[in-house]
Amino acid sequence: MRTGLLAVGVAGVAVLVTAPATAAQSADGRGTITVTPREAPAGTEVDLRVTGCDGAAGSATSAAFVSPARLAPSADEPTLFAEARVKSSAAPDAYPVSVTCDGVEGKVTGTLRVLDGSAEGASAAPSPTAPVHAGGGGTAQRQALAVHRAPSAAPSEGPGTRHALIGLGLAAVAAVAVAVRSTRRRRSSGSPTRH
């Protein structure tokens, strides 16, 4: 009796674990596209896995995607894989996903369901779709503009010959001071003390 309940429980967990992904088969029955998760809020990413393409590249398009997803061979499975970002402005609806590979447009098709941004606490926060100008790159651009506008205000290139000579002179003075002090100590410790 307990073994039967355990088997039913394991089967139920297996169904729940595989529920977030959906696979759609192509019209000719030779390929599938798996969209994970199959229901995604606007502004999030989905994973695409495609079978049925003979080549090592392809693209997946949908009106819900920010841009076409470039399919490439998956490292762990014999499929093509891509990540696609759902437009933050996509209205809740079912959107067709079409895969072009082997020179055939729409060779594999599937569906992505876009959820309302407020569904299950998900928010459609705006996110960048291109690299952000950060770090030293922005500083270099501003510095180049400043030098171009006022060449006389250009910063120096760092320490030059003049700075090197000043440093060597200071080091020589410090070496002489240490030598003089150490000779005075030796003389004073070597002579007999008078009381």
Image: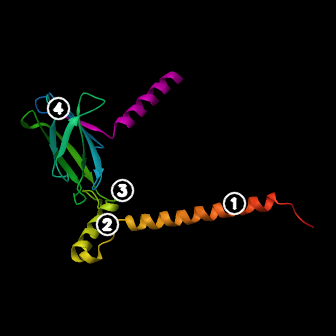
Answer whether residue 97 is visible to the viewer in this image.
no
Residue visible at 80% across and 59% down? 189
Image quadrant where residue 163 sits: bottom left
Q: Find out whether the residues at labels 2 and 3 contact each other: C-beta distance under 8 Å.
A: no
Question: Mark 2 against mark 3, which lies toward the viewer?
Answer: 2
Q: Earlier in the sequence, mark 3 or mark 1?
A: 3
Residue visible at 87% across and 63% down? 193
Spatial CA distance of label 4 from label 2 is 41 Å
Q: Earlier in the sequence, mark 1 or mark 2?
A: 2
In the image, what residue type sits under mark 1?
Ser
**In the rendered view, does 33 fall on the left or right side of 75?**
left
Mark 2 crowdedness (10 Å alpha carbons): few <14, some 14-19, many ≥20: few
Disc 1 is placed on an element classified as: helix
In the image, what residue type sits under mark 4?
Ala
- Residue 135, placed above or below residue 29: below
Q: Position of residue 40 (x, y in %)?
A: 29, 50
Q: Position of residue 137 (x, y in %)?
A: 30, 61
Q: Which residue is mark 3?
A: 122
